[in-house]
Image: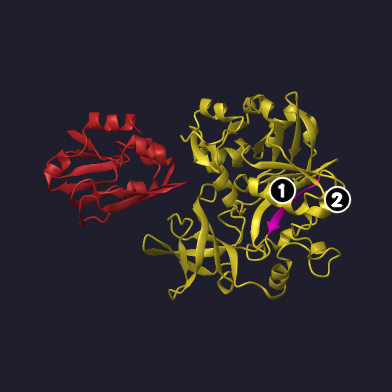
Amino acid sequence: MTTMFTPDHEWINIEDHEAAVVGITPHAQDALGDVVFVDLPEVGRTYKKGEVVGVVESVKAAADMYMPVEGEVVEVNEVLRKDPALVNRDPMGEGWFFKVHVTHMEQFDQLMDPPAYDALLKNL
Amino acid sequence: MSADLRHTPLHDLHVELGAKMMPFAGYEMPVNYPDGILAEHRQCRQAAALFDVSHMGQLRLKGDDAARALETLTPMDVVDLGVNKQRYALFTNSQGGLLDDLMITRRESDLLLIVNAACKDADVRHLVTHIGQRCTVVAMPERALLALQGPKAVMALSRLNAEIAPLTFMTGGAFRLAGVDCFVTRSGYTGEDGFEISVPADDAVVLAKTLLREPEVKPAGLGARDTLRLEAGLCLYGHDIDDKTTPIEAGLTWAIQKVRRPGGARAGRYPGAAAIEAQLATGTAIKRVGLVGLERVPVREGATIFDSHGHKLGHVTSGTIGPTVNKPIAMAYLAANHGSAHHEVYAEVRGNRYPMRVSAMPFSPHRYYRG
């Protein structure tokens, strides 16, 4: 199980060879504050790397969510629509956003590994 | 954080309490503390929240002619304002637009003005330029300002000085709190009962720490202040009102006393009186309204509002999901013929249109103490 990170403070975790899980990092949820709304991508649609796939909004601000790698969205976390604060409580676990079928593994490999992301956070 | 941002006297206390600091109106201010905006909002609705609003401008006008002079810059009745009475006021420009909104309190020997942080330097120049010959305008950077807001604010503050309890909404007086001479008004910007406390800057930390030791009180930042005032239907200068909006368009006609309206003993004779009186007589093309979302999507400042046929009606000036009302709420300027209560309109958010209903404000009922 490998988790990689993007400069936009998203994480992507390859669970198995079928689908990767995507969410936002503890840093991202902390910067946003209390999450009150999420807009999730369309299941069955293929998005390009870097395309806007969703929105996460706190009381104060809205932030776009970007596709970390190209692929088809195969599942979204429906629980977030009713309980968006789950993103604050468990950003790396129960607060995941969607699952994507990864077709270009090299895009995954080019993302930041945990030490690289930690270094990014230290330099903020 | 940028080095040229100003600090309030409570800056180090905010940092010590774990606040997230952000630039606001030239100051580094707490947006929220570790509990977060939602918890701080609820704290204020249910118990008591302490806000640092020392970035706001505190000014004094001194001199026998001060009230009369001030009436040349505002459509409010200042002359008849009784001692220790407070009043909401507006500075207007020659077109009837708003230069700032403020609170005026008549004290024994002066008028105390509380103005917006972003406007305070311009307000002082405006006052000195136009009425500096008739009264003395004194900025008070040596004072901090704390707001203690919420249904239990009176319990907490009474423990420091029981004499504050009989104060009613929009009145004030000088009180000693935690050994410090303060000027306290029973007012605020949250829709709740509460107090604003003008305190010498050097004593602000002691007073804040004393208040935070009271069991009802927790600190709250500008994030919660914004959601609270929006639920209370109160305008934020620079967003819901500005130099392009008149008091009539903004729905602030109530703030203009009869004595300053046509037919009143001291009618007119303030900047923009002609424009404002014309709107009083014939109405306005646009008006500020409250909107409640019928779907749970936040509608924020800048969103365009349409009617059911796709005609543009106006735009949103403030909006969020109201933590207490638990629905999307917003203020918007709409074509006046679409501004009646219960009218359904559509807000465009990221290319989609979501239904909203024109709603009376406040969204969350005011709970002021009127005695």
Residue under label 2, please give it: B65
Q: Chain of mark 2?
A: B
Q: Position of residue B138 (x, y in %)?
A: 75, 41
Which quarter of the picture shows residue B173? top right
Q: Amino acid at mark 2?
A: Asp
Above or below for B249 versus A115: below
> Does any portion of residue B184 appear in the rendered image?
yes
Above or below for B5 versus B115: above
Residue segment shown in magenta: B85-92
- Where disc 1 sits, the SS reads strand
**Number of marks:** 2
**Residues under numbered marks 1 and 2 in contact, where contact means CB atoms less than 8 Å apart:** no
Left or right: A20 in relation to A122: left
Of badges 1 and 2, nearer the viewer stands 2
Residue under label 1, please give it: B103
- Chain A: give its colour: red
Please tell me which residue lies in front, A82 or B210: B210
Q: Chain of mark 1?
A: B
Which scheme is used to colour this image of the protein? Answer: by chain
Q: Position of residue B30 (x, y in %)?
A: 53, 36
Please tell me which residue lies in front, A22 or B279: B279
Above or below for B328 versus A20: below
Report the chain shown in yellow: B
Q: Residues within 10 Å of mark 1 (few under 14, many from 20)?
A: some
Asked if badges 1 and 2 are on one and the same chain, I answer yes
